[in-house]
Amino acid sequence: MRADRLLSLLLLLQNRGRTTAPELAAELEVSVRTVYRDIDALGASGVPVLADRGPAGGYRLADGYRTRLTGLTDAQADSLFLAGVPGPAQDLGLGADLAAAQLKLQAALPGRLAGRARQIQERFHLDATAWFRDADPVPHLARIAQAVWDQRVLHAHYRRWRGEVRRELHPLGLVLKGGIWYLVARVGAGAGARDAAGEDTVRTYRVARFLAVDTAEAGFERPAGFELAAYWQESTDRLDAALRRQTAQLRLSPRGRQLLPMQFGAAGTRALADAGPPDADGWVRISLAVESETIAVGDILRLGTEAEVLGPPALRRALAETVTVLAGRYA
């Protein structure tokens, strides 16, 4: 285990350059004291690790030093052939590049690992698009992706639910979520670049809603410390909290307990984890986070007769009124 960690430490220093002990500790998920011991161990084995002191200091490898200890394990080689999803790569204009890269990688791997890679491709396939939904048409994705890569300003014509707008955008990254592409971008100068608190405005745009994009000659500076994965996680957490502001009290049949995770995803799974004991008929009571009353009625109706709303009273009344209308319509 320590040998793997020492190799990871060495590769981090080689790929990132000067890095502080706390940063290395966070990356390797160990204590700072452990990093100090591992740095000493690398030095004792002949690796020229230099320590720069001061506010901008950290550890780095001596200029010109590179390790050749980059062999792949079985699991690492397998993961490389699961990492490329052909459909999204094609959307980005990288389909041919992905295929060529995989061929080159296969040619470079030893015979045993190359055989495993072929088995992975034969036996596993990744499809990023959700069931019963066609992929979004994204005619401007390749151009947007190039602007992200080149760090170039985009002049965009975008369709919102309230109407069409034109924006100057600083494209920071692309995210594929459930088969749908999203652009994360900062609004450029002169287009409401800061919010009410004076902070930079970073927003999420559905790529399929771009009506036109033009790449400007000008570049832009990325926000200091911006991390795409961290932004996306915070954004999705905020959205989930904003949408699911109400809690519904439900009774569920045994069949309803099976349907709940399929209809409500993670929220349904969490609700079942805190469910009370079944009654004599096998029904349980749960507390389920739901969206607005109108949306909650539609969502709960998908459970059919396998669920009963106990509260809040307004939601129970709304569901009863909807069922009454339906009963009259189909009488």
Image: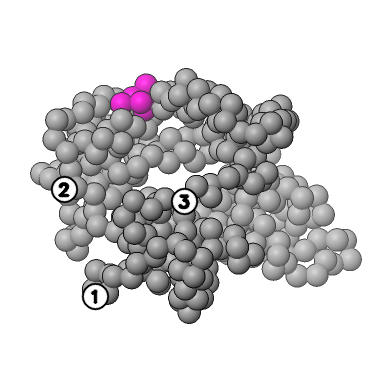
| Residue 326 in view, yes or no | no
Give coordinates of residue 41: x percent, y percent.
51, 71
Magenta highlight range: 138-143
Check the image and report above or below for 95 versus 84: above
Q: Nearer the viewer, mark 2 or mark 3?
A: 3
Q: CA distance from mark 1 to mark 3?
A: 27 Å
Please tell me whether mark 2 sits on a helix, a strand or a loop.
Answer: loop
Marked residue nearer the N-terminal end (2 or 1): 1
Q: Nearer the viewer, mark 2 or mark 1?
A: 1
Marked residue nearer the N-terminal end (2 or 3): 3
> Is 121 placed left or right of 41 in the picture?
right
Badge 3 local density, few (<14 within 10 Å), some, or many (20+)?
A: few
Marked residue nearer the N-terminal end (1 or 3): 1
Residue 192 marker: 2
Image quadrant where one finds the C terminus = top right
Proximity of marks 2 and 1: CB atoms separated by less than 8 Å: no
Give coordinates of residue 284: x percent, y percent.
77, 63
Q: Which residue is mark 3?
A: 67
Image quadrant where one finds the N terminus = bottom right
Please tell me whether mark 1 sits on a helix, a strand or a loop.
Answer: loop
Give coordinates of residue 44: x percent, y percent.
49, 70
Work out whether residue 109 or residue 49 is closer to the camera in this orientation and state it.
49
Work out whether residue 141 or residue 201 is closer to the camera in this orientation and state it.
141
Q: CA distance from mark 2 to mark 1?
A: 39 Å
Residue 35 marker: none
Check the image and report above or below for 8 versus 122: below
Q: Amino acid at mark 2?
A: Gly
